[in-house]
Amino acid sequence: MNLIENLKWRYATKAYSNIKVTEEKVDQILEAINLSASSCGLQSYRVFVVSNPEIQKKLGADSYNGQISSCSHLLVFAAFNDMTSRYIDDYMTMTEKQRGLDAGALSGFRNGLHSYFSAINEEQKALWAAKQAYIALGTALIAAAELKVDATPIEGFNAATIDEVLGLKEKGLYATVILALGYRDSEKDYMAATKKVRLPIDEMITKVY
């Protein structure tokens, strides 16, 4: 199974070469993200693709993760600060159109979403949205491995810096997690030749039938 072999190949790359990932491969990873699972299908996050060395340097200025500035492309997963009634209505309208449904066909689902989100506070909404971004991050990691593109998921960054540089606050978003993409520099990356370490499968997994 190629997927398993590719997941064995991938690791959190520590040092990147100066080889750029093609836009075709980046676009495939982005399409995989767009197809990722999300609660209620609402896609409560946005992804910003940065491939400008000067901007990357600014984004990584307060971070110990050099991959932010040295990678080929940096994906910033930015979650919603809020889940508004207008967004829900617009998304349901889009869903009805794409599925060829009559206008209002999803009114029951729409009302249920309104009821749920009106009952939780802003902090809970933001946390819910962040969890969806992490699901998408996982999809991106798998897609990158399938394309033999190296990747590094990163939480060690200054969110305030990224929010400011990318203007996320004005868009109702906040930086949640980032993903560096590129190709490993095997000579400089001390992890490149190390064996992947994982728990035995029977210790990790419990089957309940």
Image (spheres, rainbow, N blue to C red):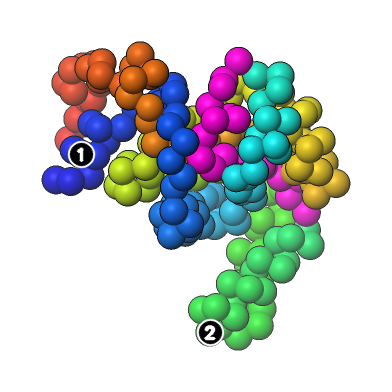
Task: Give the residue at x 64% y 38%.
Answer: 53
Tag in front: 2 or 1: 1
- Location of the C terminus (image quadrant): top left
The answer to which of 106 and 174 lies nearer the viewer is: 174
Q: Identify which amino acid the numbered label 1 is placed on.
A: Ile
Taking the spot 46% from the left edge, 45% from the top edge, the residue there is 20
User: Of all residues shown, which one is farthest toward the right?
Assistant: 170
The image position of residue 206, as x and y in percent, is 22, 25
Q: Is residue 73 above or below residue 198?
A: below
Horizontal relation, residue 119 to residue 156: left or right: right
Residue 12 pos. (x, y %): 40, 26
Residue at 80% from the left image edge and 49% from the top image edge: 171
| 98 inside magenta stretch | no
Nearest the eye: 152 or 21: 21
Provide the residue designation for mark 1.
4
The residue tagged 2 is 100
Residue 185 % position (x, y): 38, 27
In the image, taking residue 12 as reference, residue 104 lies left or right, namely right
In the image, the segment drawn in magenta is 64-84
Q: How crowded is mark 2: few (under 14 residues within 10 Å), some or many (20 or more)?
A: few
Contact between labelled residues 1 and 2, with CB atoms less than 8 Å apart: no
- Under mark 2, the amino acid is Gly
Q: Tag 1's secondary structure?
A: helix
Tell me if I can see residue 141 in this picture.
no
Could you say which quadrant of the image residue 154 lies in? top right
Q: Is residue 104 left or right of residue 75?
A: right
